C-alpha cells in the first residue's frame, strides 16, 4: 500500500478553516508556529513567555479568522498579532533581552570581551532606556531584518514613526553602551 501525499495550498486551508474545519486550522498552525515562536522569543527572551504568545496568537487568529481578508500572507497576519501581543506582554512585565549580536559590541568597541554576567547586566541596563515600542521596532528591524515598511505594518504605525522609534532606540542604546565602556 502506498500513501498518497496531497499538498493543500495555504489559501485552501484558510478557506477550510474559515468554514470551521479544525484540521485545516491545525495544519496552518503547524506550518507557522515555529516562526511565531522565534519572533516572540527574540522579542521576549523567555521560552515560557514565547510559548504563551504562540498560544495567544493562534487563539486570537482562530477567533478572528473569518475577518482575515488575505490581502497579505497568513504568516504576516500572525506575525502582526504576535508582535502586538509581545509589546503588550513587554509593557506588563518589562522584560529585557540581550542584544549583543544586534548591537555589535565587538565591532563598535575595542574593549576586551566581558564575561557573560557583566554583558547581561550591561545590556539589561541599556535596554531599560527603551520604551516597549522602541524595543519592538528595534527587534523587528535589526534582528528580523524587516524593512521599515514591514515593521510599520506589523506594528500598525506609520513608517515615519518607525524611523523615529529606531532613531531614538539606537541613540539610547549607543549612549548607554558608550557610558558603560567609559566606566560611567
Image: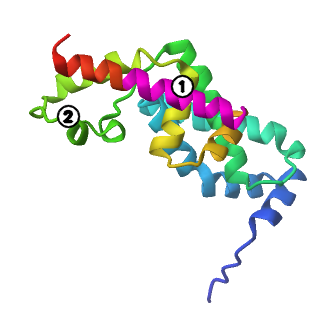
The answer to whether 160 is drawn above or below residue 28 in the figure is above
Disc 2 element? loop
Q: Quadrant of the C terminus?
A: top left
Left or right of residue 49, residue 119 in this image: left
- Residue positioned 17% across, 18% down in the render: 182
Residues at marks 1 and 2, CA–CA distance in whole angstroms? 23 Å
| Magenta run includes residue 170 | yes
Q: Which mark is residue 134?
A: 1
Query: Which residue is at the front of the view, 86 or 173?
Result: 173
Q: Is residue 177 magenta?
A: no
Residue 1: give x, y in percent of width and height. 62, 89
- Residue at (75%, 64%) from the top-left corner? 10
Q: Is residue 68 above or below residue 49?
A: below
* Region rendered in magenta: 157-173
Residue drawn where x is 29% and y is 40% of the image = 104
- Proximity of marks 1 and 2: CB atoms separated by less than 8 Å: no
Residue extending furthest bottom? 1
Q: Position of residue 169 (x, y in %)?
A: 47, 26
Q: Is residue 7 left or right of residue 111?
A: right
Neighbourhood count class around disc 2 (C-alpha, 10 Å): few under 14, some 14–19, many 20 upward: few
Instruction: Estimate the x, y position of residue 133 in percent, counting from the top left.
Output: 58, 24
Name the quadrant containing residue 137.
top right
Q: Nearer the viewer, residue 91 or 164?
A: 164
Q: Residue at x 81, y 37 (%)?
A: 63
The residue singled out by tag 2 in the image is 109
Label 1 crowd bin: few (<14), some (14–19), many (20+), radius 10 Å: many
Residue 173 in picture, x, y percent from top left: 38, 24
Q: Of callouts 1 and 2, which one flags the residue occurring earlier in the amino acid sequence?
A: 2
Q: Examine the residues drawn in magenta and state their main secondary structure.
A: helix
Q: Nearer the viewer, mark 1 or mark 2?
A: 2
Mark 1 residue element: helix
Amino acid at each position: 500500500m502506498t500513501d498518497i501525499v496531497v499538498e493543500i495550498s495555504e489559501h485552501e486551508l484558510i478557506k477550510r478553516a474559515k468554514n470551521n474545519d479544525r484540521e485545516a486550522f491545525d495544519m496552518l498552525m503547524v506550518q507557522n508556529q515555529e516562526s511565531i515562536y522565534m519572533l516572540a522569543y527574540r522579542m521576549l527572551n523567555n521560552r515560557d513567555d514565547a510559548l504563551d504568545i504562540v498560544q495567544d496568537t493562534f487563539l486570537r487568529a482562530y477567533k478572528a479568522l473569518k475577518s482575515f481578508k488575505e490581502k497579505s500572507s497568513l504568516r504576516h497576519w500572525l506575525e502582526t498579532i504576535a508582535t502586538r501581543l509581545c509589546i503588550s506582554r513587554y509593557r506588563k512585565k518589562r522584560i529585557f533581552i540581550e542584544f549583543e549580536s544586534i548591537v555589535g559590541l565587538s565591532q563598535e568597541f575595542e574593549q576586551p570581551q566581558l564575561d557573560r554576567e557583566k554583558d547581561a547586566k550591561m545590556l539589561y541596563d541599556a535596554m531599560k532606556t527603551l520604551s516597549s515600542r522602541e524595543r519592538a521596532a528595534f527587534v523587528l528591524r535589526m534582528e528580523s531584518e524587516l524593512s521599515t515598511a514591514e515593521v510599520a505594518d506589523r506594528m500598525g504605525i506609520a513608517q515615519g514613526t518607525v524611523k523615529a522609534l529606531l532613531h531614538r532606540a539606537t541613540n539610547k542604546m549607543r549612549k548607554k553602551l558608550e557610558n558603560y565602556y567609559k566606566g560611567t
